[in-house]
């Protein structure tokens, strides 16, 4: 498994896993039919956080796999909803101002999720 830990801290030996931080994060989660979710927003944590929980034995392999798959499915649905909502979006004056300030007049900004291009 090539997943890295979410909870790390710097030591003289480099970055190391921080089990205390991971346990603290797990206290902010709950199980929903073998799927781990944050109490704050009912979303599934990303795979690196789930890996921390698995490493500490706070969840089992089945919960890790089910949660990870659920997170990916929820992300696909969320992105599809965003694309649909943004299909006919025309940038407001304020959005154009912010894009010009960030990228410069005459540049083309591309929304990486929708692919929509805006010439400034």
Image (cartoon, rainbow, N blue to C red):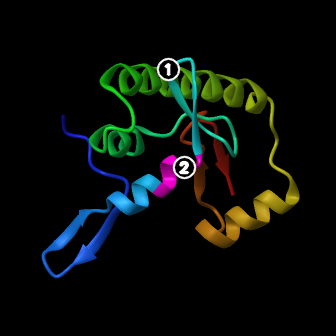
Between the residue at mark 1 and the residue at mark 2, the CA separation in whole angstroms equals 16 Å
Query: Are there few (<14), some (14-19), or many (20+) residues within 10 Å of tag 2?
Result: few
Instruction: Identify which residue is drawn at 40% across, 38% down.
Output: 50
Image: 105 above or below 114: below
Residue named by callout 1? 34
Tell whether position 67 is magenta. Answer: no
Q: Position of residue 110 (x, y in %)?
A: 57, 46
Q: Quadrant of the rendered structure where residue 111 is?
A: top right
Q: Position of residue 33 (x, y in %)?
A: 56, 17
As drawn, the residue found furthest toward the bottom would be: 12
Depth check, front residue: 120 or 59? 59
Residue named by callout 2? 27
Image: 66 above or below 51: above
| Total labels drawn | 2
Disc number at residue 94? none
Stretch in magenta: 24-28
Query: Where, quadrant-wise, is the C terminus in this rendering?
Result: bottom right
Query: Are there few (<14), some (14-19), or many (20+) residues within 10 Å of tag 1?
Result: some
Image: 99 above or below 37: below
Q: Position of residue 73 (x, y in %)?
A: 52, 20
Depth check, front residue: 18 or 103? 18
What secondary structure is marked by label 1? loop
Q: Position of residue 90 (x, y in %)?
A: 82, 41
Depth check, front residue: 45 or 80? 45
Query: Where, quadrant-wise, is the N terminus in this rendering?
Result: top left
């Amino acid at each position: 498994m090539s997943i890295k830990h979410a909870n790390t801290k710097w030591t003289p030996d480099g970055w190391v896993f921080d089990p205390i931080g991971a346990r603290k994060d797990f206290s902010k989660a709950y199980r929903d039919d073998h799927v781990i979710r944050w109490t704050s927003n009912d979303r599934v944590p990303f795979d690196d956080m789930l890996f921390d929980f698995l490493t500490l034995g706070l969840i089992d392999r089945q919960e890790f796999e089910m949660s990870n798959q659920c997170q990916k499915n929820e992300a696909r649905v969320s992105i599809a909803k965003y694309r649909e909502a943004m299909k006919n979006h025309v940038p407001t004056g304020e959005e154009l101002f912010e894009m010009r300030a960030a990228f410069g007049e005459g540049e083309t900004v591309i929304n990486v999720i929708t692919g929509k291009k805006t010439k400034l």
